[in-house]
Image: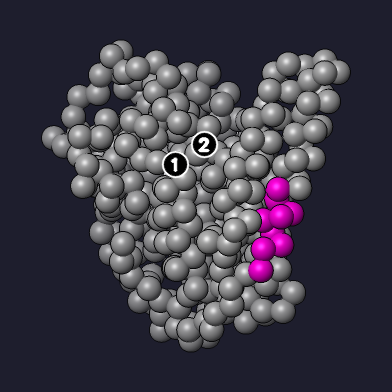
C-alpha cells in the first residue's frame, strides 16, 4: 500500500495517519525520539486508563449540547488545513542563532509529543470502547491530534529531524490515571493548549516581525481544535455532578496548580525562544493562566488566585528549585545527589505554598458550552 499518497492533514482516521507517519519515519532522527522518550515531571507523558469505566459514560444529561458539538466536529472544518502551502515561508535553519534553534527544536519536539500523547490515548479509547457516543468523540479527537503531531513533524523534518511516532507508541512508558484524573488533566491541557496557541497567535498578529517561523500562522485553526476537545471534556464532566463537587474539588485544585506550575517551569527553560517571539515569559504565563481560568469556570467551581501575593514568588521559587535539581543531576556523585535532594525539598515546599493559596469559588453554569472568544 502506498500510504504516502495522502497527507496527514487530509486523513480522518488516526490509524491511517500513523501508518503515514511510520512510512516517513525512515528519515526520523534518534536524538529527537530520545528527547520525546524522556519521562520527567516536566516532559509530556503518555497515559492509559480504565477504558471500561470510560466506556460506561452516559451522555444523556448533556445530549443536546453533545450532539451539536459532535456535528461540528464531524463537519471537519480544519480538514486539509495542517499542510504546508504558499504561506509557509522559507525557514533558514542554518542561519538561526544556535541557542534559539536548540530551544525551538526542543519546543517542537515537546509539542509534538504532547499532541501525540493525546492521539494515543484517544485512539485507544476508540479501539477499546463499544459506547457509540464515546467512541465517536474519541475517534474525532484522535483524528485531530494525529494531524497536529504530523504537521509539527513536517516542520521538524525541514531541520533534518523528526520524532518517530510509531516507535514512541511501542516503547514510551505509559502512566496510569484513573478516568476522573484523565478528565481533569485532559480537560485542562486542552484548554491551556488553546490559551497558549491563541495568545501567541494574537501577539504575532500584532507584532509580525517576531514571527520567526511560519508554523505560528497555523495556530488559530489549531487552537480551535483544542478548544473543541476541551468542550467535549467539559460535557463529560457535566454528566456526573460528583466529579466537580465535594472532595473532588481538592483534586481539581491539585490539577490546576500542577498544570499551571509545570507550564511555568517548562516555559522558563526556553528564554531565547520567548525572546525571539518578543514575549515576556512571566507576562505570557499569567496571560495564559488568566484565559484558562476564565474558560474553566464553565466546568470547575473554583479557580486559582493567580494575583495572590504568594503566587508569583512561589512559581519563581519552584523554577529556581528546578534549575538546582537539573544542576545536581548533571553534576552527579554525592555532591550532585545532595544538591538534587535540596532542590526537590525546595520544589515541594514551593508547590505546597502554591496549593494552599485560598482558591476563588464560582457558580458553574447549567450548560457549559462556550465558543472560542480570544
Ligand atoms: Fe492537538
Ligand atoms: Fe487536543
Residue 145 visible: no
Q: Residue furthest front?
A: 309
- Sequence-wise, the earlier of marks 1 and 2 is 2
Residue 304 visible: yes
- Residue 98: say if magenta: no
Residue 274 in percent (x, y) is at: 39, 35
Residue 96 in percent (x, y) is at: 31, 18
Of 59 and 291, nearer the camera is 291
Residue contact between numbered discs 1 and 2, judged by CB atoms under 8 Å: yes
- Give the crowd class for mark 1: few <14, some 14-19, many >=20 residues within 10 Å: some
- The structure residue drawn at horizontal position 65% and vertical position 42%, both measured from the top left corner, is 317
Q: Quadrant of the N terminus?
A: top left
- Residue 351: say if magenta: yes
301 above or below 256? below
10 above or below 320? below
Q: Quadrant of residue 305?
A: bottom right
Q: Which residues are magenta?
A: 350-358
- The structure residue drawn at horizontal position 51% and vertical position 43%, both measured from the top left corner, is 114
> Where is mark 2, residue-wise?
268
Distance between the alpha carbons at the discs numbered 1 and 2: 7 Å
- The structure residue drawn at horizontal position 62% and vertical position 82%, both measured from the top left corner, is 241
Q: Is residue 288 left or right of residue 2?
A: right
Q: Residue furthest left?
A: 86
Q: Is residue 181 left or right of residue 73?
A: right
Q: Is residue 233 left or right of residue 309?
A: left
> Where is mark 1, residue-wise?
281
Amino acid at each position: 500500500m502506498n500510504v504516502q499518497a495522502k497527507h496527514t492533514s487530509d486523513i480522518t482516521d488516526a490509524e491511517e495517519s500513523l501508518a503515514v507517519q511510520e512510512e516517513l519515519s525512515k528519515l526520523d532522527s534518534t536524538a529527537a525520539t530520545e528527547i520525546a522518550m524522556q519521562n520527567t515531571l516536566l516532559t509530556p507523558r503518555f497515559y492509559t486508563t480504565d477504558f471500561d469505566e470510560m466506556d460506561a459514560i452516559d451522555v444523556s444529561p448533556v445530549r443536546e449540547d453533545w450532539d451539536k458539538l459532535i456535528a461540528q466536529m464531524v463537519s471537519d472544518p480544519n480538514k486539509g488545513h495542517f499542510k504546508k502551502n504558499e504561506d509557509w515561508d522559507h525557514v533558514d535553519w542554518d542561519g538561526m542563532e544556535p541557542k534559539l534553534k536548540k530551544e525551538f527544536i526542543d519546543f517542537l519536539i515537546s509539542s509534538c509529543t504532547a499532541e501525540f500523547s493525546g492521539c494515543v490515548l484517544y485512539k485507544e479509547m476508540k479501539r477499546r470502547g463499544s459506547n457509540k457516543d464515546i467512541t465517536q468523540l474519541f475517534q474525532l479527537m484522535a483524528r485531530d491530534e494525529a494531524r497536529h503531531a504530523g504537521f509539527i513533524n513536517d516542520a521538524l523534518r525541514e531541520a533534518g529531524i523528526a520524532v518517530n511516532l510509531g516507535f514512541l507508541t511501542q516503547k514510551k512508558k505509559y502512566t496510569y490515571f484513573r478516568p476522573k484524573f484523565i478528565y481533569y488533566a485532559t480537560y485542562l491541557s486542552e484548554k491551556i493548549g488553546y490559551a497558549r496557541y491563541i495568545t501567541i497567535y494574537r501577539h504575532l498578529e500584532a507584532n509580525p516581525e517576531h514571527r520567526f517561523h511560519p508554523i505560528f500562522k497555523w495556530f488559530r485553526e489549531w487552537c480551535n481544535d483544542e478548544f473543541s476537545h476541551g468542550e467535549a471534556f467539559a460535557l463529560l464532566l457535566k454528566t456526573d455532578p460528583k466529579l466537580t463537587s465535594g472532595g473532588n474539588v481538592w483534586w481539581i485544585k491539585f490539577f490546576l496548580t500542577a498544570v499551571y506550575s509545570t507550564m511555568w517551569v517548562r516555559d522558563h527553560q526556553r528564554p531565547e525562544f520567548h525572546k525571539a517571539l518578543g514575549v515576556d515569559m512571566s507576562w505570557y504565563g499569567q496571560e495564559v493562566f488568566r484565559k484558562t481560568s476564565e474558560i474553566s469556570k464553565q466546568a470547575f467551581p473554583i479557580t486559582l488566585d493567580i494575583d495572590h501575593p504568594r503566587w508569583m514568588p512561589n512559581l519563581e521559587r519552584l523554577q529556581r528549585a528546578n534549575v538546582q535539581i537539573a544542576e545536581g543531576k548533571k553534576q552527579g556523585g554525592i555532591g550532585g545527589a545532595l544538591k538534587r535532594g535540596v532542590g526537590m525539598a525546595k520544589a515541594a515546599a514551593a508547590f505546597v505554598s502554591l496549593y494552599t493559596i485560598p482558591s476563588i469559588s464560582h457558580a458553574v453554569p447549567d450548560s457549559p458550552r462556550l465558543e472560542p472568544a480570544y
